[in-house]
Image (cartoon, rainbow, N blue to C red):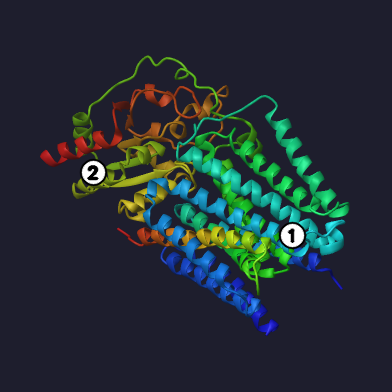
Amino acid sequence: MLSPLMIGLYVFVLAVFVGFELITKVPPTLHTPLMSGANAISGITIVGALQCAAYVDNPVVSNYIGFFAVVLAMINVVGGFLVTDRMLKMFGRKG
Amino acid sequence: METLIHVAYLVASVLFILGLKRLANIRKSREGNALAAAAMALAMIAALIDIGTVDYTFILAGIVVGSLIGAVAALRVEMTAMPQMVAIFNGMGGGGSLLVGISHFWGNVGDGTGPMAGTLGSDVGITLVLSVIVGSVTLSGSLIAFAKLQEVITGRPVQFAGQKAFNGLVLVASLVIGAWLLYVGGGPGAGQSALIATAVLTLVLGVTLVLPIGGADMPVVISLLNSYSGVAASMTGFVLQNNLLIIAGAFVGAAGLILTQIMCKAMNRSLANVLFGGVGAEISGGGGEYTSVKEAGAEEAAMILESVSSVIVVPGYGLAVAQAQHVIREMAEILESNGCTVRYGIHPVAGRMPGHMNVLLAEANVPYDRLVEMDQINGDFKNTEAVMVVGANDVVNPGALHDDSSPIYGMPILMVHEAQTVFVLKRSLAAGFAGIKNELFEAPNTLMVYGDAKKTITKVVEELKAS
């Protein structure tokens, strides 16, 4: 059996190639929204943050840290997607 | 149930791919962004179901606080300030990954004595240390990039003796502490202190890595930090053994890396040169005297523009500073109503982040099909009657083509000097970021129009309207 680390590495390397293929096709005009959109996606760490902030009875140190992780990741996610949408809306117009 | 959650993560991964794919098409890009946002929402719901019944106080409070801050910032930011906004969001993502790593350590290793590899397994341990290192560098590096772009601190490179050696030492030290944590460990509390020490060291590293990089090289830095924030998310994915985090992080890592490459190529510089070269450090006195410069006023410019049939506007960071994008569009509309074609020639590194000029011009309602990239428009300058350079300098310096002593020699430029008449709107003859003389300003077909770009173009518009 492969260790989880090795499976993860396979997934990581293949995903990097998929990412390269996808992003090379983005025209330079859209590079700023691409960046802010990709940026929002890096907020996926929210999935881990939510786990860290969860507790059953009393919060311990790791949960307090988790709370701040949720805050930071949510700023990244919500801010990133909203600002990208604002920009893309402007590009919708054609002369 | 577990299977269902993994299926949800898989669907979210696919939605991210479809979203990014649509981003490549201007008409579908908004939809693509919405798909990616939906993927994120789905991932969060799946994660919450996975967590099960817990006390949701921290989770909800964190979501509300973070969303509010993010939304207010995103809706209020000016388009000219987009680079620093992206930098700060980037830092938040990196910071999130850093805290997830630390929290995971506190929750699962805690006071446990002995090596972390024993408690968590070396696979998880290694990636945990890496998520802390990459997350810290992303967080503090992004904050410094923000401070530079916002001009809280100087945009010029800040260097000190032995900076590279210092950075190298800090990196090695943090790796050594990380390795100690993994395989040696210590008594109660020692592990936590070691992890915090690693985080602090790499936070310092983020600062000293970005400080020596100049303002005009920020497109590269932001792209690279963007890549790091993705790698940090991937690392937390390894820690939590969650493929969705690994995949989504890898996409961002790849995106940032591609943009980094494009930016470096557009400056004909290596990544190492951008990161460590300290270009733009010395403020030279304009890099030599100008002898035969011809000057024109707004009235003269208006007169010439009125009579031509093709105009290319070349915007640079100065356009953003002067906030001249709206009045330029107004000018273009008047010229177009006279039967003149107006296009915009955009250098890949114009502005402070990739695509910065496009966003500013789109904000001013310039149709995106008038925004032409360098390679497409460069052949057209020789058939163009008038070019208006607004706040760009090094990217239109013909010295880059033939002067092999020039620091920008070999950098691809916009061939504006081939046009019949070139107006250069500039405050003065001061040197650009590279600190060198611009041959274009002395060219026989160049007319310098001094002053604030917005005021100058407003005057041109008035003249055009009056006649």
Instruction: Give me the chain letter of mark 2.
Output: B
Quadrant in the rendering for residue B327: top left
Residue on which the image places disc 2: B331
Q: How many marks?
A: 2
Could you say where residue B273 lies in the image, as x and y percent from the top left?
Answer: 63, 34
Quadrant in the rendering for residue B310: top left
Q: Is residue B10 above or below residue A77?
A: below
Residue A24 falls left or right of residue B419:
right
| Residue at screen point 25% across, 25% down | B296
Task: Please tell me how crowded label 1 is: few (under 14), some (14-19), or many (20+) other residues with Cα within 10 Å.
Answer: many
| Residue at screen point 33% across, 61% down | A93
Could you say where residue B366 lies in the image, as x and y percent from the top left?
Answer: 31, 52
Residue on which the image places disc 1: B105
Frontmost residue, B258 versus B385: B258
| Name of the residue lying farthest toward the front | A58
Q: Quadrant of the C terminus of chain B?
A: top left
Frontmost residue, B227 versus B387: B227
Q: SS for tag 1?
A: helix
Frontmost residue, B203 versus A40: B203
Q: Is residue B424 something that shows in the picture?
A: yes
